[in-house]
Amino acid sequence: MIKIITVGSIKEKYLKDAIEEYKKRLSKYTKLEIIEVKDEGLCPPQQAMQKESEKINKYLSEKDYIITLEIEGKELTSEEFSKKLDEIMIRNSNITFIIGGSYGIDKSIKDKAKYHLSFSKMTFPHQLFRVLLLEQIYRAFKIMNNESYHK
């Protein structure tokens, strides 16, 4: 099972449509759950991240293999990401990805993560990033199963 915990909600229809499309495609390979927690809006960054971390923690369990998405994380190619997911799934049935809010992810959550992943040194809107993550997870399953799509 793959769980994505994300700070903030999606309002744009075109992004909702893309998310639904990838959820449908991924249903062939894995159970997927997307959990949205409310962002803290305009308050000091450390306070916002701390409050958001409290909400995120409610959805974490001891059996989750936690992967945080952060600029400081390790960058992987699509093939390396696929291999990493495959290796994790051999030992862990629950993989949880965490996408932070506009200020990032609180250290308390980063400390729980077993892997820190970066898609780029660039900053992406978290709404759009959710689509990018789903696409890469889908691509990873296609690669694992030697199915066309990847190139």
Image (tube, grey):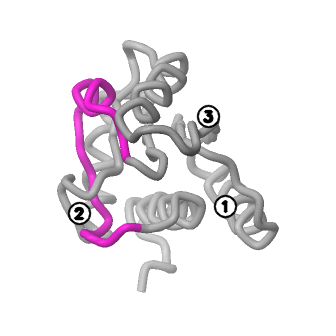
Residue extending furthest toward the bottom: 151
Q: Residue type at mark 1: give it.
A: Arg
How many marks do you count on the picture? Answer: 3
Specify the quadrant that holds the C terminus: bottom left
Q: Which residue is mark 2?
A: 80
Secondary structure at badge 2 equals helix
Pointer 3 with pointer 1, Cβ within 8 A: no
121 within the magenta span: yes
Tell me which residue sits at (45%, 65%) in the image: 136
Tell me which residue sits at (33%, 42%) in the image: 68
> Which quarter of the picture shows residue 42?
top right
Placement of 93 over or under 13, stated as above or below? above
Q: Which residue is mark 3?
A: 37
Secondary structure at badge 1 equals helix
Placement of 138 over or under 90, stated as above or below? below
Residue 121 tag number? none
Q: Residue type at mark 3: give it.
A: Val
**Which segment did they paint magenta?**
104-123
Secondary structure at badge 3 equals strand
Q: Which residue is mark 1?
A: 25
Q: Is residue 89 visible?
A: no
> Image check: 111 left or right of 4?
left
* Residue 24, horizontal then vertical, whole percent: 72, 57
Judge by depth and name the residue closer to the eye, 100 or 88: 100
